[in-house]
Image (tube, rainbow, N blue to C red):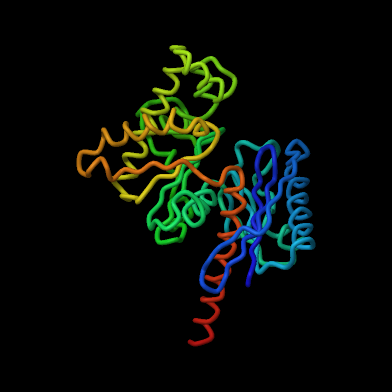
Amino acid sequence: MPRYLGLDIGGTNIKTAMVEATPDGVLTVVDSGSSPTHAEEGPAAVVARVGRMGSDRIAAVGPVAGAAVTLPGTFDAETGSARVIPNLPGPWSGTAVRGPVSSALGVPTTLVNDARAFTLAESLVGAARGLSTVVGMTLGTGVGGGVVIAGRLHLGHSGMAGEIAHQTVLPNGPPCGCGNNGCAEALTRADVFCGIAGQSTPEGVYRAAALGDLRALAAIDQVVRYLGIALANAHMLLAPDAFVIGGGIAAAGDALLVPLAAEVRRRMTMDAPENVRILPAQLGSTAGAVGAALWARSERERSVATANTASIT
C-alpha cells in the first residue's frame, strides 16, 4: 500500500505526516512528528532542515511514493521556488524548495499552499469527510483559504483559487499585505483582532470578552462582520456543503463560530439559511502536514494517469 509524506513549514514548527492509502481508498495517518523551524536561521537552513526531517521519517517508517511541502505563501509551481512568504523571516523570494527537498528524500516532491493543504485534509479525513464541496479557512497570523470539489483541490488556472480572505469586503479599507485595500484578511488577522481588543493573544481576547470587556467584544464583532461578508460571498459563488474553520482565532470554538454562522445566514437572501454549515476543524496542528501528504498522493496519481494516457496515444 503506497504511503505519502507531508512536510508543513510553520513559523514555529515544521510538522510531518505520513499517509497510507489502501486499495479501497481508505486513508490512514501512520506517522506524524514536529520539530522547531528555527526560521531565524534563514530560508536555506529551513529548507535543509525540512529535507533532513523527511529523510529521517522515511528511514524510520519506510519508503514513500511521493512527498509534498507546504509554504505559508505563494510559490512558482514551474521552478519549485518560493515567491512571497510574508510571515517567515529572511529573503524567501526565489529560494529553491522543491528541488533540494526532493533530492534529500529521493522521491518526487511538490509544493502546496498551507491553507489549501489544510482544506484538503479537513475535507478528506477531517471535519468535512464525505462532503463534496468544501471551503476551508484558517484564521491566524494571516487568513488563508482553499476549495475542494469532489475530493480534489480546485486551484484555477493560476493556482490562486481559494484565497477567500483576499476579496474586498470594505472598499477603501485598510491596506492588506497583498497590496489591495479592504481585504477580509486586513480586517480579521490575529494582530488586528488582538489590537482592537488591547490583548496580546486571541485567547486573551476571548477571556476578556467572556468578562464583558467592550474592546474584546468589539474585536469579535469586527471579525464576525467581515468574515461573514467573505463567507456569504463564497457561499453564493460555490454553494459548499460546508465551511471548515481552523487556526488560532477559531480555537475558541462556539464563541466565534456561532455568531459567524448567524452572520452568514443573515446575509442569505437567495438560498435557505439552513444550507450554511460552518464546522470547526478537527485535525488541529497536523492538518497542514496531512494535507500535504494527500496532495502528494493526488499529484502522483495525476502524473501516473498522464503517463498512461501518453503511452496509449
Image position, residue 193 (x, y; %): 50, 24
- In this picture, is 309 found above or below 266? below
- Please name whichever residue, 28 or 236, is drawn nearer the observer in this view of the structure: 28
- In this picture, is 206 found above or below 11? above
Image position, residue 191 (x, y; %): 55, 25
Q: Which residue is drawn at 56% across and 75% down?
A: 304
Image position, residue 216 (x, y; %): 47, 17
- Please name whichever residue, 251 or 139, is drawn nearer the observer in this view of the structure: 251
- Residue at far bottom of view: 312
Query: Which quadrant holds residue 243?
Result: top left
Query: Which quadrant holds residue 300?
Result: bottom right
Query: Which quadrant holds residue 259?
Result: top left
- Please name whichever residue, 171 or 14, is drawn nearer the observer in this view of the structure: 14
- Residue at far left of view: 270
- In this picture, is 45 found above or below 155? above
Q: Residue at x 73, y 41 (%)?
A: 37
Image position, residue 298 (x, y; %): 54, 65
Q: Residue at x 49, y 43 (%)?
A: 281
